[in-house]
Image (tube, rainbow, N blue to C red):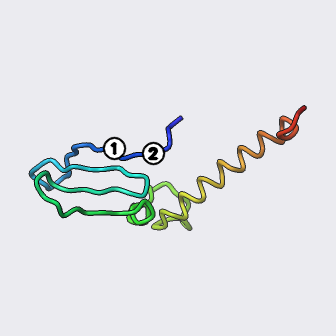
Amino acid sequence: MPTELKSTIKREIKVYGVSRPVIAQFKPHGIEMSLPGFKIKLEGSWDQIAKALSTPLNVPSYLEGKPMDFLRYQADKLDKKGADKLDMKGGEDNG
């Protein structure tokens, strides 16, 4: 299971169309990107980044072009699946 991002992770990445490596800093509130030697950075919150993404081609038509709705839809399905598992076990408190 992935761990929660609590501190900054800094990585050098290749961005298509940029001739030099880009430094990406993954932070709890979002991402910052810059070229080494420059102080000016591109920044984006996780909400901004998720909204800028595109949905896959195989999503239900009512979710096409709505990346945040798609993520909520998937989360709701997982929540329901977890609730169903609890119901099969007889609830949380078996004791």
Residue that numbered label 2 is attached to:
5
Amino acid type at circle 2 is Leu
Residue 41 shown left or right of residue 29 in the figure: left
Q: Secondary structure at mark 2?
A: loop
| Left or right of 48 in this view: 94 | right
Percent of width and height locating residue 91: 85, 41
Q: Residues within 10 Å of mark 1 (few under 14, many from 20)?
A: few
Do tag 1 and tag 2 residues touch (Cβ < 8 Å)? yes
What x and y, as percent, mark residue 7?
A: 40, 46
The residue at 50%/38% (across/down) is 2
Position of 94 relative to 45 (above/below): above
Residue 30 or 48: which is nearer the viewer? 30
Query: Three-letter amino acid code at disc 1?
Result: Ile
**Which residue occupies the foreground of this view, 95 or 90?**
95
Residue 78 horizontal side relative to residue 3, left or right:
right
Q: Quadrant of residue 43?
A: bottom left
Question: Which picture quadrant has residue 52?
Answer: bottom left
Q: Is residue 5 left or right of residue 8?
A: right
Q: Is residue 77 above or below residue 49?
A: above
Specify the label residue 56 is tagged with.
none
- Tell me the quarter of the image containing the N terminus: top right
Please identify the quadrant where the C terminus is shown.
top right
> Which residue shows up at 66% across the image and 51% down it?
77
Residue 56 locus on image (x, y percent): 44, 55
In front: 68, or 45?
45
Which circle marks residue 9 in the picture?
1
Residue at 88 percent of width and 38 percent of height: 90
Front-most of 81 and 62?
81
Using a 10 Å C-alpha cutoff, classify the residue at mark 2 as few (fewer than 14 neighbours), some (14 to 19) or many (20 or more). few
